[in-house]
Image: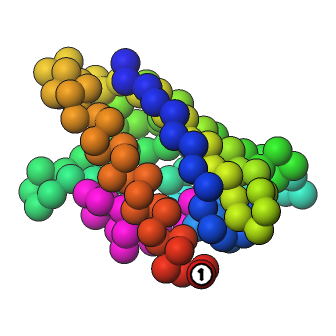
Amino acid sequence: MSSATIKKIIPCQKKQLIEMVLDIEKYPEFVPWCIEGKVYDKNESADLITFKGDLRVGKSILNETFSSHVSFYKERDKIIVTNLDGPLKHLKNEWNFKEVNNATQLEFFIDFELKNPILNSIMKKSFELGLNKIAKSFEERAIKVYK
């Protein structure tokens, strides 16, 4: 399995950053390797938003669709993403948001494993580079949209 945690201060309001992270249909506009994002079965209550999300990632004809269950716990400012279907054997992804001096401290944790052992070993080698590139894309998007 591959896992990592990234902690960043993003210069935008917590609410704005949460909305951006939950809006996976816009990921193809700014997330590297993301071709398409779709949301299904969205439910909202006073303290919880849940939905099924599909992300198609890759390049050209080499792409895969990841299906996940997304839960946003409003009171805790936390998003938890777990794997439903696709090339992942396991996925746990957490986003935690905390307001700090008119900015937002974002803590992102990911732990995953691909079903294909060969692809999994290749992914481990480039995992950190790819993760940092994706984290940077979220930061740049937040600054572009909300600053």
The percent coordinates of residue 36 (x first, y second) are 34, 64
The percent coordinates of residue 139 (x first, y second) are 49, 63
Q: Residue at x 43, y 26 (%)?
A: 3
Q: Residue at x 15, y 57 (%)?
A: 59
The percent coordinates of residue 8 (x first, y second) are 57, 50
Image quarter of residue 19: bottom right
- Residue assigned mark 1: 147
Tell me if residue 30 is in the magenta stretch. yes
Q: Residues within 10 Å of mark 1 (few under 14, many from 20)?
A: few
Q: Quadrant of the N terminus?
A: top left
Residues 85 and 104: in front is 104
Magenta-tinted stretch: 21-37
Tell me if residue 33 is in the magenta stretch. yes
Secondary structure under the numbered disc 1 in the rendered image: loop
Q: Residue at x 76, y 51 (%)?
A: 98
Q: Residue at x 49, y 79 (%)?
A: 144
Q: Amino acid at mark 1?
A: Lys
Q: Evaluate whether residue 39 shows in this view.
A: yes
Question: Is 60 left or right of 52, judged from the image as shown?
Answer: left
Asked if 67 appears above or below 30 in the picture, the reply is above
